[in-house]
Amino acid sequence: MKPVRASVRIRGMVQGVGFRYFTQRICLQYHLTGWVRNLPNGDVEAVFEGRESEVRQVLEGCRRGPGGARVEEILIDWEDFRGEFSAFDIRR
């Protein structure tokens, strides 16, 4: 399966519940690169790069989120793979 890039915005009760760390763990499990960060409006934003099947698995994990999270909506922009990351980071 070809590599892809997904720019994602996750809405709901997703800050203050460990969502960024949860996302980093599952991205490491699926060998994705990119980043995740909190936004001032309460959303979480992320960029995932890797094989399409693994990106889709991580997106399913994000739909559930960690305990305490309540995901209301995930907006996904599929983009061409750029290969610009060497790891998956939490941005501040």
Image: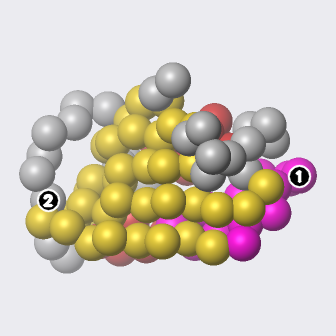
The residue labelled by disc 2 is 81
Q: Percent position (x, y) of residue 12?
A: 73, 62
Task: Specify few, some or many for label 2: CA neighbours under 10 Å numbering under 14, 14-19, or 20 or more.
Answer: some
Q: Residue visible at 36% across and 50% down?
A: 47
Is residue 16 shown left or right of residue 63?
right
**Image color mode:** secondary structure
Query: Residue farthest to the right?
Result: 68
Residue 15's place in the image compared with 86, above or below, is: below
Residue 44's place in the image compared with 36, above or below, is: below
Bounds of the magenta segment: 58-72
Residue 43's place in the image compared with 12, above or below, is: above
Can you see residue 69? yes
Is residue 27 shown left or right of residue 86?
right
The residue labelled by disc 1 is 68
The amino acid type of the residue labelled 2 equals Phe
Q: Residue visible at 40% across and 39% down?
A: 35
